[in-house]
Each structure stands twice: as structure tokens, then as C-alpha cells.
Amino acid sequence: MEKTLAIIKPDCVKGGNIGKVISMIEEKGLKIVAVKMVELSRKEAEGFYYVHKDKPFFESLISFMTEGPVVLMALSGENAISRWREIMGATDPAKAEDGTIRKSMGTNIERNCVHGSDSPESAKFEVNYFFSSLEIFE
Ligand code: IDP
Ligand code: MG
């Protein structure tokens, strides 16, 4: 069993889409093994997205991710990392497949509703960044 980190981003929380996202996760057979709603500080968001610190969109991304509450989740399942990324769709909602979360609920390449880890290494870092072992129920 593999674990991955999912985030329902501030745009998606504001849009009233928490339930829709969670339904899609469960309908596709991924298990939510940890969940909490938090407002990220700038420091927390910067640390989480450190791999993007030199990108031109970094400052804007940090402002976006700290503009309101987010829902953090750890998902578990076989190939959970790639399966969750498939359910999310491409980074840019305009390029995402029909039926994906980003296609149906994302606004643009930045305000794209959800996050998912992209590799076993990042999944480990990201799940541990937000959850202690006592908060994960598998
Ligand atoms: P991912 O979320 O699909 O893995 P990444 O390339 O890791 O995409 O980028 C992290 C996040 O940064 C994206 O989900 C999106 O919110 C934002 N982002 C990525 N590329 C751009 C861009 O070109 N302009 C503005 N924001 C971007
Ligand atoms: Mg990424």
C-alpha cells in the first residue's frame, strides 16, 4: 500500500467543493487515512513548496495557498500516488481530461483546486510534513 498527500486548496474550499472532492476520492477506491482543515502560515507554505522556490510563480503560489483554509489528507491505496494524480488531472485545468477534478473545479493553472504528491520521495516528505504517525489511521 502506498500513501500520498492530497490538499484541497483555498479556491476549492471557498467554492464549497470539499464534499465533491472527498466523494471522488472514495468513489475511486482510495482510502482517507488522515484529514484536517488548517490555515497555512507563509512559512509552512514556503517549506512545503520549497522545490518551487526559484520559479517565477512561487510568490503568487504562496499568497494563494495562504489566503484561506485548506483540507490536508493522506490517502492510501495501491499506486495511490499516480491514481490520485489521475483523478486530479493536469496542472492546468484547461489541459486536464474531462471528468478530472481540475477540469471540472479548477479555475486556472494556479487556482487548480487540489494538490497531489508526484513521487514516492515527495509523498513521504509531504505526508510527514503535515501529519504525525499518531494522526494516520491505516
Ligand atoms: P502539480 O500541482 O500539478 O504537481 P507543480 O508544477 O508541482 O504542479 O506546481 C505546483 C503548483 O504551483 C500548481 O499546482 C499550481 O497551483 C502552481 N503553478 C504551477 N505552475 C504554475 C504556473 O505556470 N503559473 C502559476 N502557478 C503555477
Ligand atoms: Mg507538484
Image (cartoon, rainbow, N blue to C red):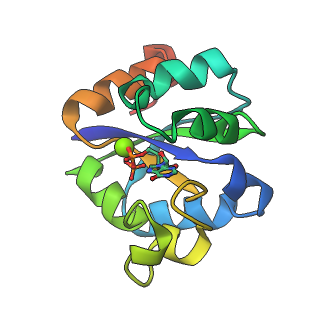
Residue at 54% from the left image edge and 44% from the top image edge: 7
In the rendered image, residue 72, in percent from the top left (x then y), is placed at: 57, 37
Residue at 29% from the left image edge and 30% from the top image edge: 122
Judge whether residue 136 can be spotted in this image: no
Give the quarter the ligand 2 occupies.
top left
In which quadrant of the rendered image does the N terminus lie? Answer: top left
Q: Nearer the viewer, residue 106 or 16?
A: 106
In the rendered image, residue 134, in percent from the top left (x then y), is placed at: 49, 15
In the rendered image, residue 36, in percent from the top left (x then y), is placed at: 64, 33
In the rendered image, residue 19, in percent from the top left (x then y), is placed at: 67, 62
Residue at 41% from the left image edge and 59% from the top image edge: 91
Residue at 33% from the left image edge and 57% from the top image edge: 85
Q: Residue extending furthest front?
A: 56
Residue 68: quarter of image: top right
Residue 137: quarter of image: top left
Judge whether residue 72 can be spotted in this image: yes
In which quadrant of the rendered image does the C terminus lie? Answer: top left
Q: Is residue 54 above or below residue 20?
A: above
Q: Is residue 117 above or below residue 130?
A: below
